[in-house]
C-alpha cells in the first residue's frame, strides 16, 4: 500500500514500432523521459506537466508508445512506475494494457535470478494508483490481482495482497471478497505470505489515526518558557541571599525538568506537537522549580536571628549588562567550607573595594536553608553600613 521509488532510471532510447528512427518522435519521448528520470525531485506542478505530456504522446502515437513501454526491462531503476502512475489518470482506457503488463512483469519476475526478483517486480506497486479508484472496468483489474495472489512468485503474491487491500478500502461492503482472499492467505504455507496477510488484516482493522495538531500546546510552551526565563532572573537575586549549594539547585532543575519532559512526551504521544516545544516546557518547569524552592524558603516564620562575620577573600566586578554600562561589584568569602559570592549595586564600588570583612544577619528559612536578612561591609577600624 506504499510506493517507494529510486531517483535513478534506466531508459531505452530511440525506439519506434518498426524499429526505424523517427527524429521528431524520439526528441519528444526523450524529452519526457529525461524529466521522468528526475521525477522524485519534481514538485506537484512539474509532475502533472510531465504526466500530461506522456498522455498526449500516448494518444498521438499509441502503437509506438506501447512498443516502447514493452521494450523497457522491468526493474526498480526503470521508469515503468512513473509511466503506470501517469496512465492511471485514464484507468478505463489503459486497464487492458496494464493487465498485459502485469502478465509480462510476473513472467520476468519468475524467470529472474533470486537476488533481483524484488527489483523486477517493484513496478507493479504502481498499480495501486489504479486499485484505489472505483472506475468502470476495475473488475478486470481485481480479477487479475486475485490471480496474482496465487502466483508462484512470492514477490508478485505479496504485491497482489497489498493491491487487494487498496481495493477493499474503496468500499468495504462492495469489495468484501478482496478481504476474504487476504484472510485465506493467512493459512499460506509460505511464511512471508501468511505473515504479510496477517499484518495487512491488522492494519485494516486498526488503522493508524492521524495525529491531531494541538495549537494551544504551542502557546502553552511559549508562555511557560518565557515565564520560566523571567523567574530564573528573579531566582538569581534570591540565590544571592540564600545559603544553598549550587548542586541542590542543579539537581532540582534537572530532575524536575526531566520528569516534566517525560510526562509531556507521554501526554502528547497521540498529538502532533514539535519536540522542541516539549523540550521548552521541560526547561521552563526546571526554572520554575528552582524559583519555588528559593521563594518558599524565604517565607520563614522563625523569629530567631544570629550574626556571623567573615573575612573577604576576593573582590571583583561582573561583566556589563546588555543595556547598561554598569559593572556590579562583588565580594567572596568562605562559609562552612564553601565559597559564597555576594553582589552589590553599582553605586557601591568604593565601599566594596575598601571592605575587608562582611557581617551577616542570618535567619533559618522555611526549607531549612539559611537566609541573609542583613549584611554589613566593614573595613579595618571602621564600620560601613550596607543594606
Image (cartoon, grey):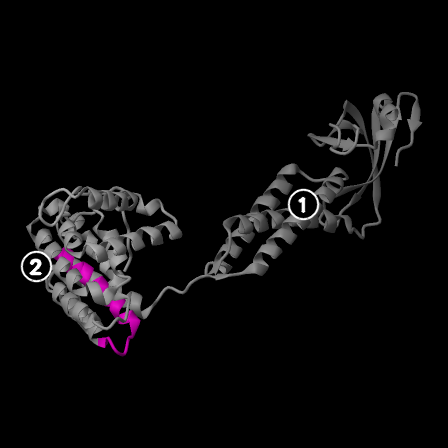
Residue highlighted by disc 2: 152
In the image, which residues are magenta? 153-176
Q: Confirm whether the magenta stretch covers residue 174.
A: yes
Compared to 85, does 37 lie above or below?
above
Residue situated in front as seen by the camera: 204 or 147: 147
Residue holding disc 1:
229
Could one spot residue 125 in this view of the protein?
no
Describe residue 223's horizontal placement relative to residue 29 as left or right: right
Looking at the image, which residue is at 87% across and 28% down?
A: 348
Residue 230 is left or right of residue 378, and the answer is left
Most common SS among magenta residues: helix
Between 173 and 302, which is closer to the camera in this rendering? 173
Q: Secondary structure at mark 2?
A: loop
Which secondary structure, mark 1?
helix
Residue 197 location, x and y as percent? Answer: 21, 64
Neighbour tally class for label 1: few under 14, some 14-19, many 20 plus, Cα within 10 Å? some
Real-space Cα separation, disc 1 to disc 2, in angstroms:
66 Å
Q: Answer above or below: position of 164 versus 306.
A: below
Residue 386 seen anywhere in this rendered image of the structure: yes
Q: Residue at x 25, y 59 (%)?
A: 87
Amino acid at each position: 500500500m506504499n510506493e517507494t521509488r529510486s531517483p535513478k532510471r534506466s531508459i531505452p532510447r530511440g525506439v519506434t514500432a518498426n524499429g526505424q528512427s523517427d527524429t521528431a518522435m524520439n526528441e519528444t519521448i526523450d524529452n519526457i523521459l529525461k524529466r521522468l528520470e528526475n521525477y522524485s525531485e519534481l514538485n506537484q506542478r512539474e509532475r502533472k506537466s510531465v504526466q500530461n505530456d506522456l498522455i498526449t504522446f500516448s494518444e498521438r502515437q499509441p502503437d509506438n508508445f506501447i512498443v516502447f513501454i514493452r521494450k523497457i526491462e522491468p526493474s526498480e531503476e526503470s521508469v515503468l512506475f512513473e509511466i503506470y502512475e501517469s496512465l492511471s489518470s485514464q484507468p478505463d482506457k489503459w486497464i487492458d494494457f496494464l493487465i498485459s503488463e502485469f502478465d509480462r512483469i510476473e513472467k520476468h519476475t519468475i524467470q529472474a535470478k533470486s537476488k533481483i526478483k524484488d527489483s523486477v517486480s517493484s513496478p507493479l506497486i504502481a498499480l495501486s494508483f489504479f486499485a484505489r479508484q472505483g472506475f468502470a472496468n476495475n473488475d478486470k483489474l481485481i480479477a487479475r490481482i486475485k490471480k496474482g495472489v496465487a502466483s508462484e512468485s512470492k514477490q508478485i503474491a505479496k504485491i497482489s495482497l497489498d493491491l487487494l487491500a487498496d481495493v477493499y478500502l474503496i468500499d468495504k461492503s462492495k469489495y468484501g471478497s478482496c478481504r476474504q482472499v487476504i484472510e485465506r492467505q493467512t493459512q499460506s504455507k509460505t511464511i512471508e505470505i501468511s505473515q504479510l496477510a496477517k499484518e495487512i488484516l491488522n492494519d485494516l482493522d486498526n488503522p493508524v489515526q492521524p495525529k491531531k495538531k494541538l495549537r494551544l500546546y504551542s502557546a502553552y510552551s511559549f508562555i511557560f518558557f518565557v515565564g520560566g526565563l523571567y523567574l530564573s532572573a528573579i531566582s538569581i537575586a534570591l540565590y544571592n541571599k540564600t545559603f544553598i549549594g549550587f548542586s541542590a539547585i542543579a539537581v532540582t532543575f534537572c530532575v524536575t525538568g526531566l520528569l516534566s519532559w517525560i510526562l509531556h512526551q507521554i501526554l502528547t504521544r497521540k498529538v502532533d506537537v514539535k519536540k522542541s516545544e516539549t523540550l521548552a516546557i521541560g526547561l521552563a518547569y526546571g526554572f520554575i522549580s528552582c524559583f519555588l524552592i528559593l521563594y518558599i524558603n524565604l517565607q520563614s516564620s522563625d523569629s530567631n536571628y544570629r550574626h556571623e562575620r567573615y573575612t573577604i577573600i576576593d573582590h571583583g566586578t561582573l561583566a556589563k549588562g546588555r543595556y547598561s554600562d554598569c559593572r556590579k561589584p562583588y565580594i567572596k568569602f568562605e562559609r562552612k567550607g564553601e565559597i559564597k559570592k555576594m553582589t552589590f549595586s553599582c553605586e557601591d564600588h568604593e565601599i566594596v573595594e575598601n571592605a575587608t570583612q562582611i557581617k551577616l544577619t542570618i535567619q533559618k528559612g522555611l526549607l531549612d536553608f539559611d537566609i541573609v536578612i542583613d549584611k554589613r561591609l566593614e573595613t579595618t577600624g571602621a564600620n560601613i553600613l550596607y543594606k
